[in-house]
Amino acid sequence: MTQALKSSLESELADVLLDCEYIDSEVTIYIATEHVLTTCQTLRDRFGFEQLCDLCGVDYSTYGGSAWETKAASDMGFSRAVDGANHSEPVDDGFRYAVVYHLLSLQHNLRLRVKVRLEATQPIIDSVTSIWESANWFEREAFDLFGILFNEHQDLRRILTDYGFIGHPFRKDFPLIGNVEMRYDADKKRVVYEPVSIEERTLVPRVIRDDNRYDKGRG
């Protein structure tokens, strides 16, 4: 049934599709930012995807450049996590971010993933709250954690972090220790923000070794 969905999408959305994948019984389509509203409207009205299950942001700045996943200790030593050959610098231009929509059709019992890539310098896209009301808080979360802006969103403000929070914690270049820390000041009788007192350090990557006890091929 998902194969038929892929064929229908490729036929009906041929003018806007950048790509259409069918992997592990899941269909994923890729579209450009300028077509997100019209495409989502079509997916709801003509393909029956009446429910938006999830909307999330993605930061691809270090995609494919992990210095941590390894099954052997290399001659580069543990410093490869800092400046090794596999270390990737954040992307400053081109497509760095993406918005991913997970859709569900109850009437057809089908699921669909929609991906839209966004510019690194100005990640902005039209809001789909006019199509699925459930996008309201999802878009606020993507704005809060990734700094992605949504045009025509009626209440685009932070939802998980504090109102005075600086930065977007799910961006790959956001420091793991954060920028500030907060505590309650008994004298001032309020919460105060101060520079973080934790010193940032490089973690030691773990070497992952195969364990024959979990080899499915052995009896």
Image (cartoon, helix red, strand yellow):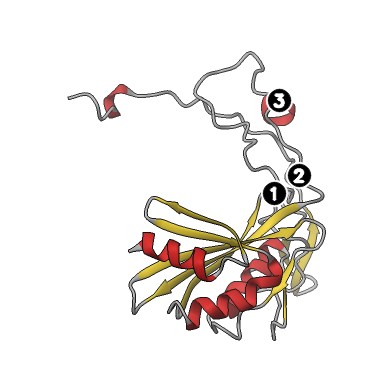
Q: Hey, what amino acid is under mark 1?
A: Lys
Of the pair 189 and 53, the residue shown nearer to us? 53
Instruction: Say what secondary structure mark 1 lies in.
Output: loop
Picture quarter containing residue 30? bottom right
Q: Which residue is mark 3?
A: 85
Residue 45: where, in percent of width, then height?
49, 83
Residue 102: where, in percent of width, then height?
49, 67
Looking at the image, tell me whether mark 1 or mark 3 is earlier in sequence order.
3
Residue 219 numbered mark, or none: none
The residue positioned 74% from the left and 48% from the top of the image is 173
Local crowd size for mark 2, using a 10 Å CA cut-off: few (<14), some (14–19), many (≥20): some
Measure how far apart labels 1 and 2 are at the Cα level: 7 Å
Q: Which residue is mark 2?
A: 90
Looking at the image, tell me whether mark 3 or mark 2 is earlier in sequence order.
3
Using the image, determine if residue 30 lies above or below residue 151.
above
The residue positioned 75% from the left and 28% from the top of the image is 83
